[in-house]
Image: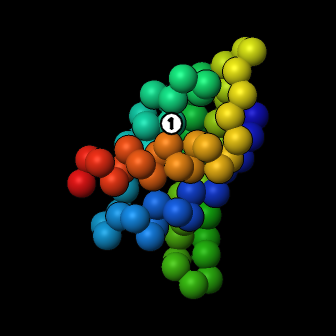
Amino acid sequence: MMMLMMMMMMFICSGEVAPAELEALLVSHVAVQDAAVVSKLDERRGELPTAFVVLKPQQSATQDQLQHYVAGSLYTSL
């Protein structure tokens, strides 16, 4: 399991994104088997989404790759 800090999305989206929407985007990635998104307290921004990701067997993805994937998906859906 890997933990991802999804701070990038706070800069791309003007509004808040529901954890379920982030989870759905992560699970739609070819390497991701399961994902859970929770809030992490942040002194500057209040809360930041944090994702816990389980990759599929024989698959790999870096935190940076998954952040860009989700950010790109959010950007195109705006």
Q: Is residue 1 above or below residue 44?
A: above
Of 72 and 22, the residue lying toward us: 72
Residue that sits furthest to the left in the current view: 78
Looking at the image, residue 54 sits to the left or right of residue 72; the answer is right
Provide residue 14's location: percent of width, then percent of height: 31, 70
* Residue at 53% from the left image edge and 70% from the top image edge: 47
* Residue at 31% from the left image edge and 67% from the top image edge: 15
- Specify the quadrant of the image occupied by residue 43: bottom right
- Specify the quadrant of the image occupied by residue 12: bottom left
Q: Amino acid at mark 1?
A: Leu
Tell me the SS state at disc 1. Answer: helix
* Residue at 26% from the left image edge and 47% from the top image edge: 77
Placement of the C terminus among the 4 image quadrants: bottom left
Placement of the N terminus among the 4 image quadrants: top right
Mark 1 residue crowding within 10 angstroms, few (<14) / some (14–19) / many (20+): many
Provide residue 74's location: percent of width, then percent of height: 36, 50
Q: Report which residue position mark 1 lands on.
A: 26
